[in-house]
Image (tube, grey):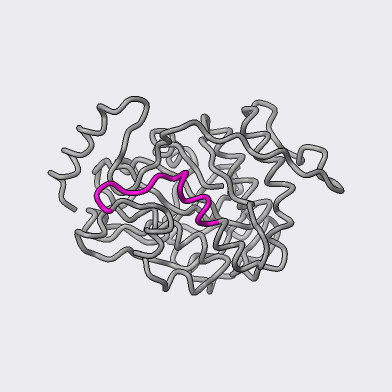
Amino acid sequence: MNRRHLKAFALASAIAVNSVLLPLGVAKADTPPAQPATPVKGAGQSQAPAGMPEKLSDTLRAQTMAKMAAREQLAGIKTMGGALPGAAIDGKQPSVAGLKNKPASDASAGIAYVQPYVEPNDYAHRNYCGAGATMVLVSHFDANYAKGDIDKVGEAINLDPDSGAWIKDITPAVNEHLSKLAGREVKYYTYGQAASKDEFRWMLDWDIRQNGVPLITGMQTATMPGWNGYDVGHIVAVNGYWKDASGKEWVSYVDTAPPASDYHGDIFVTVSLDAFWQAVSQNSAQVW
């Protein structure tokens, strides 16, 4: 990664009003989250799901209700599977075998199995983390997607090789591919911005622990493993969330950055929720 280029870009973009473009991928929104469509009521869908925190924003509550209605759209799409709380974890899955810090057998774990992916190790793809995260998320539903053409994925999410992608542009691309797999319209994933750890925890709990699917988030890298203090905007797919026997919360995510991006860590990473939220809170935007 060309640090001089990135510093110059970050400085110039900081002048923009109400938006900050960040290298490696854009996680800040240039517009407020779109209001979700009114949920379609059906059996068991008129009430808020159990465990929904009372202090969620109205937007996040409405998005949850819409996702609750839309999750039926995912029925029939083959996936790589996963482990919901109380289920055995398949240690042979790449996204489990690759973790140095795995959930213990007594953990209340939710893991959505995904395929590994690493972006091309060259300057031309230095800002392709949004595409990499998209490939990982979709690989849960289509294992071959992680073997596809990252440049085509970049086009699908309107990625600019010189600046990255907006997370809000990833959402329709994900839903479009899931619609192709399902043979019908799928609008399960939505664009959100967690404003607190409680809101982010709910996103993790709903998607991963309750529904067994991954999500995408923006973050800053300075405090994350493998970045050696280098601070840059980044986008990753999150596929695990669990509590250990002591009640401590953990998150597993997939870092697709190559060495050319100054990343020298593992593909599959485990960190505490507290540490992860510290990074996410500085660059919070999600496909969930």
Q: Is residue 97 above or below residue 219?
A: below
Question: Splitting the image into 4 quarters, where does residue 100 fall?
Answer: bottom left
Q: Nearer the viewer, residue 82 or 32?
A: 32
Q: Quadrant of residue 183?
A: bottom right
Q: 26 or 16: which is nearer to us?
A: 16
Q: Residue 282 at what x, y percent from top left? A: 39, 33
The answer to whether residue 170 is magenta is: yes
Q: Residue at x 67, y 54 (%)?
A: 211
Instruction: Please tell me which residue is depicted at 38% across the width and 61% down the height of the picture.
Output: 267
Q: Looking at the picture, tell me which residue is in the foreground, 139 or 21.
A: 21
Percent x, y of residue 62: 68, 35
Q: Is residue 59 magenta?
A: no
Residue depicted at 58% across the width and 60% down the height: 112
Q: Is 218 positioned to the left or the right of 43 in the image?
A: left
Name the residue located 64 percent from the left edge and 71 percent from the top edge. 78
Residue 22, image x and y in percent? 30, 40
Q: Which residues are magenta?
A: 161-174
